[in-house]
């Protein structure tokens, strides 16, 4: 039986960015999203890990966690659809409480955010009285509310140093915390959280890449374990890694992070060969074009922050935004 496949149309927004057949299937949904965005005065903020159909097809603004927080804080749109995970949507709501913030899937979580509660932070503060608490944005609003200041992977070192303290409690990513400790003289008290995606990379697989491709550049996210970061030529946030590829134009690169990012960057770097150990974030991958369309159609799933913690969480986020 013959199956009618959508015909490729050269005017597609995704032309050349995804296979023609996929582009033709995505285009009607992209048009629906465009109309809904217009009618609702909405924008789509997309994290760098979104798939190309979202990243290139419907995102109005893109970035790493810090950039998304800043963009959310400054938008004049009434509605923000956060194409990313829950902590990013919650941070957008904290940064701009008067906006309606939607997340297309309720299960788009994060293993780091799951690793710690507000009660854990209160116990740590009892154990280390007076030591400032620096909290990665990959956490719940409740945890942020117990913290002195937030940070992201792109500003963690600057945030720790901005406190003028000899010691900080750094939560919850043990690997990001260890990496920060290598970049500063400040003592770092760690928690045991980790990213389920980045902790799967190994130093030996990266050494294998180097043996096979002696010219390769290895660039890694600081959520990776220390022995993996020791193999890297550059360590940075997702946007830091993207900018590094833009500036350095390496002949061959391996981006040691969630693998959708290489798909997004590869389209603008035709002279660079991307080698791709593929670790996907299951939470990020719950966000789809259909989910974004439905979030705008039904105005679901709205993200709100409990009023008993919103102000304290906002203080920690705004303090971060004021530093970098
Ligand atoms: P970035 O802030 O570097 O985009 O990192 C967010 C994240 O969740 C990486 O896994
Ligand atoms: Fe969380 Fe890791 Fe997924 Fe980033 S990649 S959202 S840190 S689980």
Image: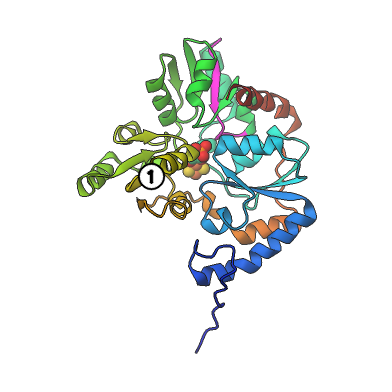
Point out residue 216 in the picture as x, y percentages from the top left corner: 28, 45
Magenta stretch holds residue 216: no
Q: Residue furthest bottom?
A: 1
Which residue appears at 26% of the width and 47% of the height?
A: 209
Can the viewer see residue 287? no
Q: Is residue 78 left or right of residue 154?
A: right
Q: Nearer the viewer, residue 74 or 139?
A: 74
Quarter-of-image position of residue 68? top right
Q: Nearer the viewer, residue 45 or 176?
A: 45
The residue indicated by pointer 1 is 249
Which residue appears at 73% of the width and 55% of the height?
A: 37
Mark 1: which secondary structure? Answer: loop
Point out residue 313 in the picture as x, y percentages from the top left corner: 66, 27
Mark 1 and ligand 1: say if the CB distance to the nearest ligand atom is below 8 Å: no
Q: Nearer the viewer, residue 97 or 271?
A: 271
Task: Work out whether 267 lies above or below 202.
Answer: below
Our reading of the magenta stretch's main secondary structure is: loop
Q: Residue furthest left?
A: 211
Quarter of the figure with the C terminus: top right
Which residue appears at 70% of the width and 59% of the height?
A: 34
- Classed neighbour count for the residue bearing mark 1: other residues with Cα under 10 Å, few (<14), some (14–19), many (≥20): some
Task: Work out whether 51 lies above or below 124.
Answer: below
| Coloring scheme used | rainbow
Q: Is residue 313 left or right of residue 262?
A: right
């Amino acid at each position: 039986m013959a199956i009618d496949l959508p015909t490729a149309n050269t005017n597609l927004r995704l032309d050349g960015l995804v296979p023609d057949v996929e582009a033709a299937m995505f285009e009607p949904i992209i048009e629906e999203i465009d109309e809904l965005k217009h009618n609702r005065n909405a924008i789509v903020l997309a994290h760098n890990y979104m798939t190309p159909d979202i990243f290139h097809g419907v995102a109005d603004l893109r970035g790493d966690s810090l950039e998304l927080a800043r963009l959310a804080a400054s938008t004049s749109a009434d509605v923000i659809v956060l194409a990313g995970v829950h902590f990013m949507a919650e941070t957008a709501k904290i940064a701009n409480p008067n906006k309606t913030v939607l997340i297309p899937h309720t299960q788009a979580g994060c293993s780091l955010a799951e690793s710690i509660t507000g009660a854990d932070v209160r116990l740590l503060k009892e154990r280390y009285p007076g030591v400032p608490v620096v909290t990665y944005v990959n956490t719940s609003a409740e945890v942020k509310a117990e913290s002195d200041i937030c940070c992201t992977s792109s500003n963690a070192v600057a945030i720790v140093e901005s406190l003028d303290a000899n010691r900080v409690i750094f939560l919850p990513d043990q690997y990001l915390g260890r990496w920060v400790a290598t970049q500063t003289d400040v003592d770092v008290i760690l928690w045991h959280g980790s990213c389920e995606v980045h902790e799967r990379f190994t130093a030996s697989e990266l050494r294998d890449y180097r043996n096979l491709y002696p010219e390769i550049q290895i660039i890694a996210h600081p959520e990776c374990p220390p022995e993996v970061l020791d193999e890297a030529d550059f360590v940075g946030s997702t946007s830091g890694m993207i900018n590094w590829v833009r500036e350095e134009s390496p002949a061959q690169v391996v981006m040691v992070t969630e693998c959708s990012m290489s798909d997004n960057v590869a389209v603008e770097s035709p002279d660079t060969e991307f080698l791709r150990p593929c670790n996907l974030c299951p939470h990020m991958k719950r966000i789809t074009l259909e989910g974004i369309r439905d979030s705008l159609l039904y105005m679901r799933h709205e993200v709100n922050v409990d009023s008993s913690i919103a102000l304290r969480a906002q203080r920690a986020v705004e303090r971060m935004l004021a530093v970098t």
